[in-house]
Image (cartoon, helix red, strand yellow):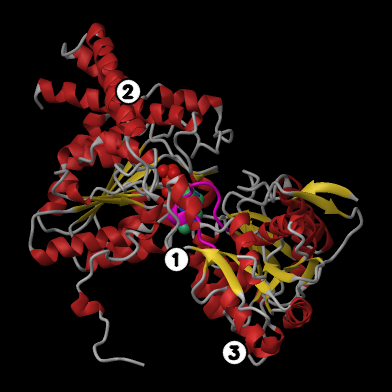
Amino acid sequence: MKASDRKRLLREMIFYRRFEERTFEAYMERKVGGFLHLYSGQESVATGVLEVARPGHDYVITGYRDHVHAIKAGAPAREVMAELYGKETGSSKGRGGSMHIFDPSVNFMGGYALVGQPFPLAAGLALACKHKGTDQIAICFLGDGANNQGTFHETLNMASVWKLPVLFVCENNLYAIGTRIERSTAVTDQYKRVCGYDIPSSQHDGQDIDVVMGSAREAVNHVRSGKGPYFIEYLTYRYRGHSMSDSGAYRSKEEEKQWSKRDPIILFTDKLKDEGLIKDEDIKAMEKEIDDEIENDCIKFSEESPEPKVEDLHKYVLDDNPDPRWIGPLQNNEA
Amino acid sequence: MAEIAYWEAIRRAHEEELNNDPNVIVMGEDIGVAGGTYKATLGLYDTFGEQRIIDTPISENSFTGIAIGASMAGLRPIVEIMSINFALLALDTLINAAAKIRYMSGGRASCPLVMRTPGGTAHQLAAQHSARLARMFMSTSGLRVVTPRGPLDAYGMLKSAVRCNDPVIIIEHEQMYNLRGEVPDEETFRPLEGAEVVRQGKDITLIGYNYSVHLCLQAADKLAKDGIDAEVIDLRALKPLDRETIRRSVEKTHRVVIAEEDEAPVGVGAEIIAIINEDCFFALDAQPIRIHAADVPVPYNAKLEKAAIPNVDDVYQGALKAVGKI
Ligand SMILES: Cc1ncc(C[n+]2csc(CCOP(=O)(O)OP(=O)(O)O)c2C)c(N)n1
Ligand SMILES: [Mg+2]
């Protein structure tokens, strides 16, 4: 990988961290409402996987912790922020909010609140790719907890039988809200659960983005080459509570400390320093530039954008411009 | 008599029923160690242990099915589903199994399951966290559906639901868990059937259930200032529905407004108006009015959300229309 790409990746991860932490502030200022789930601590997973896939070309779908996946997939960060602000200029025109970022223009097919719901949707996106004979794949990011839904098992089976080009990325952060994985899940190594479906699978460190990229590259190649689905598991950790209404008090300080030592941004920064690609001053400058970008672009854009109009309440429920040939009214139908 | 919060009332009912009957168990996501999303099961895990207070994986259809099976074999499970939106995943087992087991077995099997879940909109939780869905359960033969409006019913109806031999769906509300109200210190049961006249009046009947009762009560206060004396009925139970109380009230006031937080089509209001047509059509002096949500998925944006969901003023305006003041 080129030095400039490595520096760009570091910048991206720092950007995502700062973006998420800024949304936290905006939530505190009540500019952002509803449920807000932050991705801090897990940046290396979405960043690494999508770096070796083809964002904009491949389909990407995920759960409610979706801001970073959307941005890395190609959704403009300012539009994601504007969505959190509930503005008309947001990714989902203010209708969806934090949990439901959509940008079909880059094949980012949404964030969904219902745990496990995206599994079959991802397989369906893959089915369409296969049907059309494109070289696209579908990538589904979900948590460890989602694997306890029936949709996980049913979808894996079909995806395998039909050899669908879908990559399932499991972000195993050890918790589903306040329930630790071994209290809910018989086999805690998620990649092992897939063997019943004859789908290749593997487990990796999710905090080291080089490891993520290396392993994801193989998985992506497998899926893209027409060999069918792949399931890849990354061990990772979310820093904040599950959402703003959760303090995360069920986790031990010791555990949090252990994981903070394996912070994906620090790990990668240290590597780039060792490689002589970056110095402390560069990082300072980078952080400053990122903060300015978030403030002067994302936040300013969101603040200044208009809200949706109340008259438009019924917009987007159904096709707003349907073809009357299919919709009616019936002719010669006087009462 | 102490004033307690809605969530505390539910917690107390759990505790008493767990103490009363070793066959009572509680199941749900994050209800045990974490104490429950709404604190309705706070501390129970410590007292009753993991065999009775069961943290489940995120597997709504199957853990509800497990509760149904357990209930067929004599346990009294109380299932908490974190949000009524997630209850949709359990509809197969609730509607195809729980609601029909007694009937399909010719009365030889039963399914004394209690499922509690909050419906309703809160603040900007968007389309996948704001479902109401009372009407869907209400339209299923074989279920009981209740909608406690305050701590007393939240407490007393849960207790009755645990004792009752039918599957009971208790629909709570995201915005009511901190609502306070009086609950007697001594053990109390509240019936699972019967509407309640929560305010007497002679000029118009306002009908609500769950959260919308509060909209009706506040609208009634406003109407009183205009010299309009409104009666307010809390349906309490959506299934079976108390037609008698509705009829008596309409025959007295001759005018009616129904407030529901749900969208109107095929809704609770539609059913009530059909019942009024059937039972007391000629008592009406004005067309019945229903106040309901806009027929759209619930928007995230706060202004749009507000426009989509009925409020006190909507009920008030509806009542003015029904009495011919606008
Ligand atoms: C069907 C359904 N049930 C329950 C919930 C409530 N819920 C939201 S997130 C979550 C935990 C999910 O954990 P995991 O899949 O590990 O993802 P993470 O939040 O850790 O990224 C739960 C139980 C939900 N949103 N949908
Ligand atoms: Mg998790």
Mark 2 and 1 residues: CB-CB less than 8 Å, in contact? no
Query: Which residue is at a point 25% across and 58% down the rendered structure image?
Result: A199
Circle 2: residue type: Glu
**Could you tell me which chain the residue with mark 2 belongs to?**
A
Q: Farthest residue to the front: give it.
A: B325
Most common secondary structure along the magenta stretch: loop
Does the beta carbon of the residue at mark 2 sit less than 8 Å from ligand 1? no
Q: Which residue is mark 1?
A: B295
Is B121 one of the magenta-colored residues?
A: yes
The answer to whether A261 is drawn above or below residue B37 in the figure is: above
Q: Quadrant of the N terminus of chain A?
A: top left
Between marks 2 and 1 in the image, the one whose residue lies nearer the viewer: 1
Does the beta carbon of the residue at mark 3 sit less than 8 Å from ligand 1? no
Callouts 3 and 2 on one subunit: no
**Could you tell me which chain the residue with mark 1 belongs to?**
B
Q: What's the magenta region?
A: B119-132
Q: Is residue B205 left or right of residue A313?
A: right
